[in-house]
Amino acid sequence: MLIAQLTDTHIKPANRLAYNRVDTYLMLKDAIEHLKQLPQKPDLILLTGDLVDAGSIEEYERLNELLVLLPAPYLLIPGNHDDRNNMRKVFKDHPWISEHGFWQFDASSPDWPLRIIGLDSVNDGQSSGLLCQSRLEWLEDTLMLEDSKPTLIMIHHPPFQTGIGHMDDIGLEGKEEFAKILDRHSQIELVICGHLHRNIRATVGGRAVMTGPSTAHTVQLDLATDAASMFRMEPPGYLLHWWNGTGLVTHHVPAVFSPGPFPFFDDFGKLLL
């Protein structure tokens, strides 16, 4: 099974640039075109939050214009820039639980070797994330329902300190209890996140956790507690998570159209120097 992860797409209203510089709509469109030209097409696409920039209906409708171009089914979760209620109005058929109003789901298919769990870390009105007791209990109960099938969890806010001070200041509250849950459930193969606009890997509760690069702008890499809140226009990207039958292997893919491919060898098998 091949899973693509897109994150932090930050779609704006028409004719608007993020931070007066970033054409997030065009950059997501290019990333989707890049994804469609891969030799192997993904079976599933996961979007890990900050789908739009201000949570408006107009932004979600513009996002939907691009998501219909995706070459595979998709699942999405909200980030701190999103609005759950407006998401529900545009993505009416998307799975989410209704008991507490959170945007969470347990997705599975007989054709999938992996179980996909979406977890809502939005802390209303805040840039930081929150896993409250009801969300943590839902996750624990959901994991216990099927404790042997390999599982991937998607959540926007990463449950670890990254070293980038201004992003850690808007990190995840409740990450300690989340780590305990991860430790109790060995079927969890990977936790994927967004929020950081960079590809970062960590281990939490004995499980692999990874943030994905944004399809748009990149958070400045500055490992200081007082790091200024800055971004760069490094190459955008996405992640490919390949289930090989026994585990997940992840590839970081720059979403840019580069020259190539070129052969290493000539027609007679001789190395080209």
Image (spheres, helix red, strand yellow):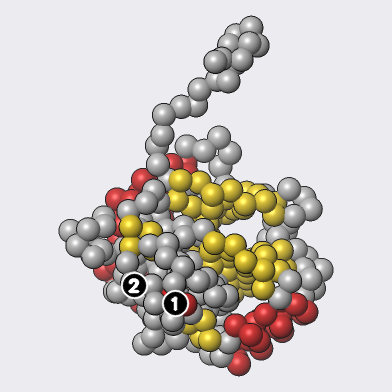
**Three-letter amino acid code of the residue under disc 1:** Thr
- Secondary structure, mark 1, is loop
Instruction: Provide the secondary structure element on which disc 2 rests.
Output: loop
Observer-nearest of 27 and 91: 27
Going by the image, does 37 lie left or right of 107?
left
User: Which mark, residue 225?
Assistant: 1
Residue 270 in the image: above or below residue 70: above
Residue 116 appears in which quarter of the rendering? bottom right
User: Which x, y percent locates residue 131?
Assistant: 56, 86
Please indicate, yes or no, whether residue 75 appears anywhere in the rendered image. Answer: no
Using residue 159 as the reference point, say whether residue 208 is left or right of it: right
Q: Left or right: where does residue 146 sit relative to residue 260?
A: right
Residue 89, numbered label: none
Q: Position of residue 156 (x, y in %)?
A: 50, 72
Rendered residue at 67%/65% (across/down): 208
Please name whichever residue, 113 or 38, is drawn nearer the observer in this view of the structure. 38
The residue that mark 2 highlights is: 228
Query: Where's residue 71, x and y in %?
Result: 49, 46
Judge whether 120 appears above or below 247 on screen. Answer: below
Residue 38 to residue 141: above or below: above
